[in-house]
Amino acid sequence: QVQVVESGGGLVQAGGSLRLSCAASGSILSINFMGWYRQAPGKQRELVARVIRGGTTDYADSVKGRFTISRDNAKNTVSMYLQMSSRRPEDTAVYYCNANVGINRRGYWGQGTQVTVSS
């Protein structure tokens, strides 16, 4: 099993920057890839960005050039970050960290962190 915890959400003005952090612990050697998702009120959860084993990154078109995902592997923990710049009101959502684990590709989710961008 993998435990995932996010942190770093809050209120930011449009155009500002914010960094989200995620820490994964447990069976971290079985992690295939990790990603950030978000869910705005009344909308479905969507992929924001992900980083695959080996460092390859993938972004939603809506955040390309504004958000940067990174990953740091330690002995017992995998940390993942989402640096968000040039924030827009439409970026307001609950942001979730996800770890895709094992041959069955089971997803482990964090509890989510609220990010609000004021115009």
Image (cartoon, helix red, strand yellow):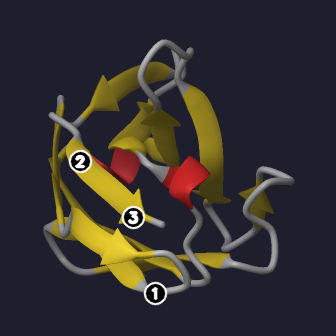
Residue beneath disc 2: 114
Q: Which mark is residue 118?
A: 3
108 up-or-down from 69: above or below: above
Q: Position of residue 38 (x, y in %)?
A: 47, 38
Q: Earlier in the sequence, mark 3 or mark 1?
A: 1
112 up-or-down from 103: above or below: below
Front tag of 3 and 1:
3
- The picture quadrant where one finds residue 13 is bottom left
Q: How many marks?
A: 3
Q: CA distance from mark 1 to mark 2?
A: 16 Å
Q: Type of residue at label 1?
A: Gly
Q: Type of residue at label 3?
A: Ser
Residue nearer the viewer, 32 or 17? 17
Residue at the front extreme, as displayed: 119
**Residue drawn 75% across and 68% down?**
56
Q: Position of residue 108 (x, y in %)?
A: 30, 28
Say whether residue 78 is visible: no
Q: Type of residue at label 2?
A: Gln
Mark 3 neighbour density, 10 Å: few (under 14) some (14–19) many (20 or more)? some
Front tag of 1 and 2:
1
The quarter of the rendered structure image containing the N terminus is top left
